[in-house]
Each structure stands twice: as structure tokens, then as C-alpha cells.
Image (tube, helix red, strand yellow):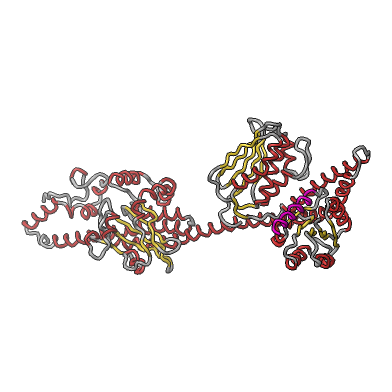
């Protein structure tokens, strides 16, 4: 019999069957497989069957039943196989996601993996996903991150890129974290901002999903009277999936996923897969954010410890200084009374001594020397008093104006004039008025003693960041390096600067205030002295 | 002639005050302790008290309070080796405050000022 189809031949040449495609040439040699895979669907075979029937073949009536049954089973097998394949892929994918989620403590890394997994074709293949998280105070659920294309064009570009890349999910997530995370946070900013919902709003679908601990598939959202239509408008889709993220009993947040570009229906299987995935994501997110907070606390503790150590050092230093102050003060006071008696009687005697008396010179010497000793004592006492500043809020400009006004006679006598540049809007500064006043006077006196007659003294106040500056500049000869150093060493004497504790006391006073004192030579000539007072918002 | 009471526990200082202030034309009486001072100022003949803050075992500030209480109109100038008491509010009861110095000009000026003020008030 000459049949149209090749089913009766054990072996054929490729030209004999038009349905054997490229790569299937081995079917030519395998009779059994060729019949099962090709002939059963072949129109030529159907024609042969019809001819068999015409010719009265006894099995011709039965074979079509068997065939159709076989085809049905084959189709079913195909579906089951497809299902198994997709499940297999899902398991591999979940394992990969799980591994990262279980090991990562970095919030950004967890986010990247989770969001890539939802939107990547290798993962759940949703077009777009939004993550909303509960805020620290657990008052609201807030939009945190959105991932996916914004429009059709971007979608194709992205999918094309992904299609060509051979990255694993982990690599893709890493790449996403490195190159895209920050831009994606900005990209959906407008949508995320509108997604804040108070956790107390029981009726809201987000809270319903969290309460039910089950995903909710929202369909036909734009026309559903039970739903907040605003949400659908914000998202721009009417079908989306709301997936609650719950770790133990804590509400971590929710994921909203949709197919805004392809409008592919969200299947029950999509929902189930996402649900399996939601738990490890919630757990990892919670762990990562707890870890982040822990790190913040550790950082705070470290800073506090550092500050504590600084304070301790300061306390020890202050105790030492206070002791020095006490000793100095006690010695100074015991010297003061006899000194007063010596000097006082010398003056009395001087008054009663005739102009020509040769003892007069000796008495004058005693008076002069006593006066000098008393001046030194006064400075030593100021020094020991400076160890205990009384801090209060004062207007720096007012202080400078008062000090300069009181110094006016001295300036005039020395033939100098002072120029004031006072910043009009200075904040109040916490300081010991008397001590800072002392500093200003000490600086002006130092400058005066070094300047020539007719010189100009410039006094400025200004703000720099969190500090108020008082700067006094003169046109005296520039100080040498050793003089600059000497100025801030107590009781140091230089020929150029005279003697005493004046400026070193300034430094001590300002250190007590937690402020700074600096002396520098000016490029245009002269020296400038700067008192830097910190502006403190709270009580020190 | 104004009559001054000088209270100081150091004999040499009392001597110096007495000599300098007598030269200035004042009548000067001295006291070495709070007790002695109280006995003396009670007769009511003084115009001014010059008082040291640190007396041997007594506080000049306590004495100041006593004077203010008993003789409200009697002015007091605190004279001390300590400049820090200037900010002690109980020292504000005094009419003047002078830091001890071999140059007594400041004290003399202060005496004149306080006496002039007292006379104006009277």
C-alpha cells in the first residue's frame, strides 16, 4: 500500500517528512519516536487514516479515539511539565534570594535583592514594585522605595538590557544597589510621597492586608466602590497586589506590585509565590533595620564615651588648676598685707622727708618696688579667680563698647585712635562678662604698649559659623615667633611685650569658657588678636 | 572733723591707717576685733567705719550686717586684700569697697565720696 505519510517506514530520509525540523534529524532513524512525536499530529497521517477507513480497515474506527486520548494526555503532560519547570525555577530562585536575605545585615542590600527579585524576569517578573515601611515611631506606613520602569519605552530598554545580561539574581541585585538604588529612590518620589497611611486607619486596604496577614489582589480598582479610588489614581493602574510584610507580630511594611506596562493579569500563582517570598523579606528587613539602629546607637555610645573621657581630663585639669589657684591666692593674700604696710609707711615717710634729703631716693625706690609687687599680686589673684568663670548670656557688642569707652582716656593719653567695626546682628553669648572684659582690656593694653603714637587700633566683632569673634588689630611692629609663643605662657617676660600674665590669662579664661584665643601677625603689618566665643544653644 | 572707726586685726595696718588718715585731717579710732568695734561704734559718735573682711576668727561681713542693723545711717567701707568679695551680694550692704593697697589714695577718695554722700543725705 502506498501511504501518504511516512509512518510505515522504519527509517526515512529527511526529505520524506516535511515536519521534521532542524535539529530533529535523529527522528529519521527512530521509528517509534517519530510516530509518537510527529505522525500523530501529521495531516498526511490523518489522510492515511481516512483512506484506511474507506478501505475498511477494522481498526480505522478506533484509532482516532486512541489518538485523541493520547493527544489530550500529551497536552496535560506538557502543562504539568511546564508547571514543574516553573516551580523548579522558583525554588532555585527562592533559595538564591533566601541565601542573601539570611546573611545580609545591610538594609540597602536587602532592599536591592527583594525589589530585584520581584521585578526581574528571572524572579517574579512583575513590572513594578513599591516598598512601604512603618516609620520608627510606628505611627505611619510610608512610601520608601519604588522599582521598575516609569513608562513603556524605559521598560523595553531595561528588559532588553536584562535579556542580554547573563547575571544571576545576586549579581543583578548587587548591580542594582551600586548603580540604581539611589536614582530609583528619587524616580518614584512623587508616588511614594502620596502613599503615607496612618497605621491607625483600620479601614485602609494597607492596614487590612497587614491585619489579615494575607496578600490582597485588587482588581478593577478605579470602579470599585469599596476601595479608595485615590490609590488607583496614584499608582495609575487598576490591578495590583498588596503584600503585607510581617515578622513575628511586627508590621514591617507592605509591597505593592503591579504589571503597569504589560497589563498581564496577576495570577493566583504569582500571589502564592510572592507570599512565600514575603516572610524572609520581612524578616531580613526587620533585622537589617534593627542592625542599622544598633550601629547608630553604638556610634552614639562611642561619641558619648569620647566626650566623657574629654570631660574627665578637663575635670582633672580643672581640679589641678583649682588647687594651684587656691595656693596662689593664699600666698598672694599673705603677702599683700605686709606689702601694704611697707609701701604705705614708705609713702608716709616720703611725705615728711625734705626735698634735698638723700634718703628720699631710697624711700621712692621702696614705694616704686612695692607698687610693682602689688601689681604682680593683683594679676596673680585675677589669674586664680579666672579659674572659676560665672557664665551668663551677654551681648558681645555691648561688652566691647563698654570696655572701649572705659579705655578711651588711656587711648587718648597714648595718642591712639580706635576704629570700631561691630557686626549689627550678633547672637547672645554665654560667658563671664568680667573675665571677657578683662581679656579685651588686656589685649588693648598690650597693643598700646607696643604701638607708636598716632597709631590705629581696629576693634571688630563678627560671626563665623557657630562662633562670635572679637578681633583687635594694631599696627605695632609684628611680633616675633618667640614673642607669639611667650604671650600665651603665664608669667613669661619678653622685652618686646613687657611682663605679666595679661595675655596668658586671656588664654586661660577663654579655655575655661571652652573658647579660643589666637594671636597672629597681619600680612599688611601689625598684629591681630582674636577671641573666639562659641555660641551655645543650650546650657553648658 | 569726721570721726572714723578703722577695724582691722593687724596692728601694723591699724597704725598705717591711723597715721595716714589723721594726716588727712580725720579723727581716727581703731579696733582689732568685732567685739571691740561693736563696743566702740555704739556710742554713736562715728561718721564712717573702715572694715576689713577677714578678721582673725570673725567675719567682717557678719560685723557689717550688725552695723547696718544697729546703726543704719552709719556708712561702711569694706577694705580687704580680696577682690573677689566685690561680687558677694552681702558685701553690697557696704557703701564702698576698696582693695588694700600701699597707695592709699583710692581709700581716701572713697572716704570723701561716702562722707559727701552721707552729708547730702543728711
Depth check, front residue: A273 or A402? A402
Depth check, front residue: A370 or A123? A370
Depth check, front residue: A392 or A285? A392
The residue sitting at 25% across, 48% down in the picture is: A29
Task: Classify residue B74 as left or right of residue B40.
Answer: left
Is residue B116 on the magenta stretch? Answer: yes
Res. A88 in view: no
**Does A78 appear above or below A396?**
below
Secondary structure mainly formed by the magenta segment: helix
Picture coordinates of residue B50 (x, y %)? 79, 58
**Does A440 appear above or below B53?**
above
Q: Which range is magenta?
A: B105-122
Q: Residue furthest right?
A: A358
Picture coordinates of residue A427 (x, y %)? 55, 49
Task: Classify residue B60 as left or right of residue A259.
Answer: right
Picture coordinates of residue A244 (x, y %)? 36, 63
Depth check, front residue: A254 or A92? A254
Res. A236 in view: yes
Amino acid at each position: 500500500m502506498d501511504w501518504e505519510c511516512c509512518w510505515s517506514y522504519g527509517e526515512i530520509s529527511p526529505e520524506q517528512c516535511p515536519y521534521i525540523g532542524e535539529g530533529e534529524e535523529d527522528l529519521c532513524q527512530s521509528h517509534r519516536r517519530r510516530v509518537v512525536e510527529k505522525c500523530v499530529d501529521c495531516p498526511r497521517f490523518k489522510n492515511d487514516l481516512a483512506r484506511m477507513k474507506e478501505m475498511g480497515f477494522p481498526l480505522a474506527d478506533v484509532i482516532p479515539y486512541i489518538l485523541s486520548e493520547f493527544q489530550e494526555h500529551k497536552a496535560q503532560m506538557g502543562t504539568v511539565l511546564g508547571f514543574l519547570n516553573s516551580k523548579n525555577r522558583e525554588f532555585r530562585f527562592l533559595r538564591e534570594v533566601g541565601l542573601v536575605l539570611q546573611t545580609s545585615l545591610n538594609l540597602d542590600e536587602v532592599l536591592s535583592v527583594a525589589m530585584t527579585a520581584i521585578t526581574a524576569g528571572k524572579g517574579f517578573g512583575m513590572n513594578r514594585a513599591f516598598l512601604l515601611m512603618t516609620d520608627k515611631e510606628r505611627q505611619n506606613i510610608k512610601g520608601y522605595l519604588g522599582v521598575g520602569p516609569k513608562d513603556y519605552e524605559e521598560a523595553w530598554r531595561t528588559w532588553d538590557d536584562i535579556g542580554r545580561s547573563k547575571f544571576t539574581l545576586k549579581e543583578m541585585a548587587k548591580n542594582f544597589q551600586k548603580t540604581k538604588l539611589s536614582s530609583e529612590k528619587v524616580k518614584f518620589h512623587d508616588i511614594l510621597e502620596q502613599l503615607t497611611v496612618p497605621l491607625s486607619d483600620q479601614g485602609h486596604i494597607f492596614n487590612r492586608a497587614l491585619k489579615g496577614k494575607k496578600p490582597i489582589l485588587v482588581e478593577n480598582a478605579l470602579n470599585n466602590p469599596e476601595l479608595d479610588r485615590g490609590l488607583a489614581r496614584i499608582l495609575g493602574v487598576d490591578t495590583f497586589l498588596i503584600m503585607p510584610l510581617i515578622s513575628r507580630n511586627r508590621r514591617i511594611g507592605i509591597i505593592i506590585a503591579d504589571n503597569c506596562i504589560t497589563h498581564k493579569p496577576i495570577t493566583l500563582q504569582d500571589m502564592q509565590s510572592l507570599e512565600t517570598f514575603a516572610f524572609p523579606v520581612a524578616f531580613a528587613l526587620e533585622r537589617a533595620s534593627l542592625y542599622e539602629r544598633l550601629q547608630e546607637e553604638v556610634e552614639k555610645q562611642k561619641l558619648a564615651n569620647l566626650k566623657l573621657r574629654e570631660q574627665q581630663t578637663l575635670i582633672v585639669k580643672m581640679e589641678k588648676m583649682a588647687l594651684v589657684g587656691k595656693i596662689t591666692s593664699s600666698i598672694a593674700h599673705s603677702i599683700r598685707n605686709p606689702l601694704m604696710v611697707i609701701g604705705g609707711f614708705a609713702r608716709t615717710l616720703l611725705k615728711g622727708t625734705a626735698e634735698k634729703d638723700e634718703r628720699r631716693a631710697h624711700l621712692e625706690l621702696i614705694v616704686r618696688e612695692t607698687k610693682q609687687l602689688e601689681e604682680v599680686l593683683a594679676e596673680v589673684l585675677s589669674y586664680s579667680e579666672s579659674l572659676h568663670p560665672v557664665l551668663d548670656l551677654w551681648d558681645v557688642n555691648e561688652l566691647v563698647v563698654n570696655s572701649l569707652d572705659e579705655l578711651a582716656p588711656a587711648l587718648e593719653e597714648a595718642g591712639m585712635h580706635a576704629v570700631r567695626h561691630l557686626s549689627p546682628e550678633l547672637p547672645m553669648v554665654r560667658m563671664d562678662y568680667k573675665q571677657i572684659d578683662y581679656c579685651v582690656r588686656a589685649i588693648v593694653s598690650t597693643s598700646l604698649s607696643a604701638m607708636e603714637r598716632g597709631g590705629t587700633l581696629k576693634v571688630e566683632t563678627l560671626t563665623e559659623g557657630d562662633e562670635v569673634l572679637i578681633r583687635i588689630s594694631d599696627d605695632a611692629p609684628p611680633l616675633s615667633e618667640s614673642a607669639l609663643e611667650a604671650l600665651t605662657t603665664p608669667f613669661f617676660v619678653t622685652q618686646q611685650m613687657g611682663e605679666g600674665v595679661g595675655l596668658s590669662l586671656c588664654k586661660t579664661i577663654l579655655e575655661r569658657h571652652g573658647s579660643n584665643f589666637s594671636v597672629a601677625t597681619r600680612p599688611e603689618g601689625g598684629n591681630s588678636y582674636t577671641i573666639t566665643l562659641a555660641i551655645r544653644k543650650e546650657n553648658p | 572733723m569726721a570721726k572714723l572707726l578703722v577695724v582691722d586685726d593687724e596692728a601694723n595696718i591699724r597704725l598705717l591707717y591711723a597715721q595716714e588718715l589723721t594726716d588727712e585731717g580725720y579723727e581716727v579710732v581703731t579696733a582689732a576685733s568685732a567685739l571691740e568695734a561693736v563696743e566702740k561704734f555704739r556710742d554713736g559718735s562715728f561718721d564712717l567705719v573702715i572694715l576689713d573682711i577677714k578678721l582673725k576668727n570673725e567675719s567682717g561681713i557678719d560685723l557689717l550686717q550688725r552695723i547696718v542693723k544697729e546703726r543704719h545711717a552709719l556708712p561702711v567701707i569694706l577694705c580687704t586684700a580680696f577682690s573677689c568679695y566685690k561680687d558677694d551680694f552681702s558685701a553690697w550692704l557696704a557703701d564702698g569697697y576698696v582693695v588694700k593697697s600701699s597707695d592709699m589714695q583710692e581709700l581716701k577718695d572713697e572716704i570723701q565720696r561716702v562722707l559727701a554722700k552721707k552729708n547730702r543725705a543728711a
